[in-house]
Image (tube, helix red, strand yellow):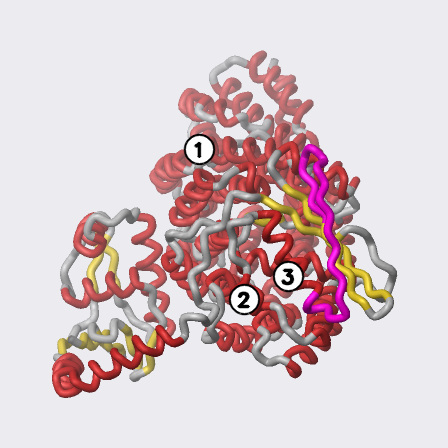
């Protein structure tokens, strides 16, 4: 059947949506929902109805439904503006456009075609079966699942300048062969923290993985002979060493690889994987020189060697894979994807196919094509669902990152939970640490603070065990965000200072800048504007040094924020305009949104109300589209301030009370305290001091900052006649408020003293 509406056609035969006969990319969930709505135009359905009718028992949350509806609206509106899916508050949603149903001729034609061509198809089936049998020796045979062996392959020593490839490339090449042959689980030496020496790193790995075998490789060229030396050592210092010499580099590497396979897993047949090693010694040397250049980050030199390599041997699959990596590093994603597409259509081993798809997904992710990346990762995992390898675990982690980028947070958490359960800590503790860190970050973003804190603490413990200081610094920042979210600013400062100590000791400028970003915000909230300003000067300097536009933009935002907080409105307006120019230049939606929020605060502080409602409406559209519900209480707070200034006080209570409950569901202590302060101010202005105190008491569990919390309590007590208590509270507030305390507050304190 075909369903027509506006310029669109949904074809149930092809399961595709068309606009003007051009197909539109649409995930399965979007297609199923749209088909259901087209079958029931003009009818009202609740989200529960949709889950029952469309997903039929499969697990899906109402939040996921909201996201799918939002994205479906966006896809349709990008092609033709209109009202498609109307939401009626408290009732549900319905499909608005008129739908015309047309019978498709495709099904009848296919049936007729099949009946006429059945004899031909039978012949084709026989031919295909014969072709499959005749190509049984091609390298598409299913690879055996890897053993539980865990090995670390690395170079033995540093080579002389100009000949580094002799040292770097053999280990890299053998690592590639073992990965494709799935001989063992491979620990990656590149995971070693830069500040740990080889001995420290290996000893630490043996503590975590007692069965780990460390393989070192060394290659020399002398007297027209290539000599490959391999050494295997375990935790008990049992050593096995063997060397292989030949005039042909290919022969030497082949013999070395065969020997290592026998040492690691004598039951494995490595013969079919020998086809990956080129017979031509010249091609082999070109390839290994390319690997050496890639390891040093010399992309153009690597490109040169690999081009020569492929001109000599076009069907050298490993060289093609590395060439795709080079093209991506050169900023040529389309060329990289073309190489990967050709490679995927060649007869390659299973693990190599996984590497191809992983690289393809990474490119889509880098391009911001998250739907393509997500669907690709899901397809790969479904295809190899019975396999278990560290490589597939990394794809699952990449998938969680892509879900997060698509704001599909429930799916991201599900993927991370499964990874956490299935990763063997003795095999891949590094990945487990990153899984827990990412999980903590997403949970905090979703408002599940307690769970986020638990995941972050587990991750911090693992990074400490790995002696990964940068990982620890990253976790301290995550913990600081959680503390800030809860309103515990002193604890947040402690965590951030720990992160700063680590990043500065390692001279990691990007890490220092990222930590200062978090610290400046907390210092501002605490009223320590001078220290915040100095920290921001340092962050801006780092942003310019490392040419990081996003960090520079955040720095300009902070200059605006600090100026506004000190009532330096002219300076704040200059910084706001500079921030807008940077946001427009980058065309970053999140930065443009932030500029609107900054403008709302600045105009409210100056009581300039003309543009407030239109700015709030723009932010509300963003919230509705992205379902970023953490922003909803915040924008409601801005709207309440607007009503306050317009003397429409009756609207304030009706808006803020449900907003506070929503903030509680996301454990957003900071916003809850701000809402309570505004409500208390309203009740104090209304001379209802008892109600104000009751509201302020609700802030206690969120550890409110002294200013204006204590000042509001003082004013409420003054109304009730408790003047001495009011004076105590005011004096305490002044002594702890830093630069938040104003001249107007001094006037209030003086008047209070005189009244006593």
When asked about the image quadrant of residue 321, the answer is bottom right
Q: Where is residue 386 in the image (x, y as percent from the top left)?
A: 38, 52
Residue 616 in sight:
no
Q: Which residue is rendered at x = 75% and y = 59% of the image?
A: 228
Q: Which mark is residue 577?
A: 3
**Residue linked to disc 2:** 363
The segment highlighted magenta reads: 231-251
Q: Which residue is rendered at x = 61% and y = 34% of the image?
A: 210
Q: Which of marks 3 and 2 is in front?
A: 2
The first of marks 1 and 3 along the sequence is 3
**Disc 2 packing (10 Å; few <14; some 14–19; many ≥20):** many
In the rendered view, tell whether residue 395 sits above or below residue 466: below
What secondary structure is found at the residue carrying circle 2? helix
- The span from disc 2 to disc 1 (Cα, nearest Å) is 49 Å
- Quarter holding the N terminus? bottom left
- The span from disc 1 to disc 3 (Cα, nearest Å) is 32 Å
Q: Which residue is rendered at x = 41% and y = 43% of the image?
A: 418
In the rendered view, tell whether residue 295 sits above or below residue 186: below
Which is more toward the observer, 74 or 414? Answer: 414
Residue 476 in sight:
yes
Q: Residue 679 carries which label?
A: 1
Query: Is label 1 in contact with label 3 (beta carbons under 8 Å)?
Result: no
């Amino acid at each position: 059947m075909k369903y027509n509406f506006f310029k669109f056609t949904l074809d149930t035969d092809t399961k595709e949506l068309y606009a003007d006969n051009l197909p539109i990319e649409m995930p399965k969930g979007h297609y199923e929902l749209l088909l259901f709505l087209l079958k029931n135009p003009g009818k009202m359905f609740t989200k529960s109805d949709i889950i029952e009718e469309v997903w039929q028992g499969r697990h899906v949350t109402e939040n996921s439904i909201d996201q799918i509806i939002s994205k479906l609206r966006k896809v349709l509106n990008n092609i033709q503006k209109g009202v498609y899916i109307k939401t009626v508050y408290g009732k549900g949603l319905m499909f608005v456009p008129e739908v015309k149903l047309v019978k498709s001729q495709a099904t009848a034609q296919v049936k007729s075609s099949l009946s006429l061509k059945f004899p031909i198809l039978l012949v084709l089936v026989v031919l295909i079966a014969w072709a499959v049998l005749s190509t049984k020796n091609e390298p598409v045979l299913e690879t055996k699942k890897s053993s539980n062996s865990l090995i670390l392959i690395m170079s033995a020593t540093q080579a002389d300048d100009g000949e580094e490839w002799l040292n770097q490339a053999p280990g890299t090449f053998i690592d590639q062969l073992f990965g494709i042959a799935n001989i063992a689980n491979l620990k990656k030496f590149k995971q070693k923290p830069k500040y740990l020496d080889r001995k420290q790193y290996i000893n630490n790995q043996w503590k975590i993985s007692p069965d780990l075998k460390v393989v070192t490789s060394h290659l020399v060229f002398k007297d027209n002979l290539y000599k490959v030396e391999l050494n295997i050592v375990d935790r008990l210092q049992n050593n096995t060493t063997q060397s292989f010499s030949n005039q042909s580099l290919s022969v030497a590497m082949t013999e070395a690889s065969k020997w290592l396979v026998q040492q690691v897993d004598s039951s494995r047949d490595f013969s079919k994987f020998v086809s990956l090693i080129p017979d031509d010694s010249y091609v082999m040397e070109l390839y290994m020189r390319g690997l050496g250049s890639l390891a040093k980050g010399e992309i153009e030199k690597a490109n040169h060697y690999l081009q020569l390599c492929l001109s000599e041997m076009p069907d050298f699959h490993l060289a093609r894979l590395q060439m795709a990596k080079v093209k991506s590093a050169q900023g040529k994603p389309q060329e990289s994807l073309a190489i990967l597409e050709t490679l995927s259509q060649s007869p390659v081993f299973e693990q190599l196919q996984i590497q191809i798809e992983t690289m393809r997904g990474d490119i889509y992710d880098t391009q911001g094509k998250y739907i393509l990346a997500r669907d690709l990762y899901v397809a790969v995992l479904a295809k190899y669902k019975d396999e278990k390898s560290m490589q597939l675990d990394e794809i699952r982690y990449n998938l969680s990152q892509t879900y997060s980028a698509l704001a599909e947070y429930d799916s991201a958490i599900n993927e991370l939970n499964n990874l956490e359960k299935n990763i063997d800590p003795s095999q891949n503790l590094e990945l487990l640490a990153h899984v827990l860190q990412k999980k903590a970050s997403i949970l905090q973003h979703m408002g599940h603070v307690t769970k986020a804190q638990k995941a972050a603490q587990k991750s911090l413990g693992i990074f400490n065990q790995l002696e990964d200081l940068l990982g620890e610094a990253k976790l301290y920042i995550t913990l600081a965000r959680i503390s800030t979210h809860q309103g515990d600013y002193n604890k947040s400062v402690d965590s951030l200072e720990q992160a700063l100590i680590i990043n500065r000791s390692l001279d990691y400028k990007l890490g220092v800048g990222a930590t200062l970003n978090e610290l400046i915000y907390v210092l501002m909230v605490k009223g320590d504007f001078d220290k915040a300003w100095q920290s921001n000067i340092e962050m801006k300097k780092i942003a310019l040094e490392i040419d990081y536009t996003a960090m520079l933009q955040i720095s300009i935002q902070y200059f605006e924020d600090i100026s506004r907080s000190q009532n330096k409105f002219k300076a704040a307006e200059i910084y706001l305009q500079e921030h807008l120019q940077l946001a427009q230049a980058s065309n970053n939606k999140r930065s443009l949104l932030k500029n609107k929020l900054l403008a709302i605060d600045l105009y409210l502080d100056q009581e300039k109300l003309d543009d407030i409602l239109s700015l709030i409406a723009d932010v509300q559209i963003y919230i509705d589209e992205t379902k970023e519900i953490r922003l909803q209480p915040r924008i409601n707070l801005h709207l309440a301030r607007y009503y306050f200034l317009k003397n429409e006080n009756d609207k304030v209570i009706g808006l803020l009370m449900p907003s506070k409950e929503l903030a509680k569901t996301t454990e957003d202590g900071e916003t809850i305290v701000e809402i309570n302060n505004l409500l208390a101010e309203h009740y104090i202005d209304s001379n209802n001091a008892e109600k104000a105190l009751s509201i302020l008491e609700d802030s206690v569990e969120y550890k409110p900052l002294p200013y204006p919390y204590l000042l509001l309590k003082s004013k409420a007590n003054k109304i009730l006649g408790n003047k001495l208590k009011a004076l105590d509270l005011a004096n305490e507030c002044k002594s702890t408020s830093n630069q938040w305390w104003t001249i107007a507050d001094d006037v209030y304190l003086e008047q209070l003293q005189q009244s006593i």
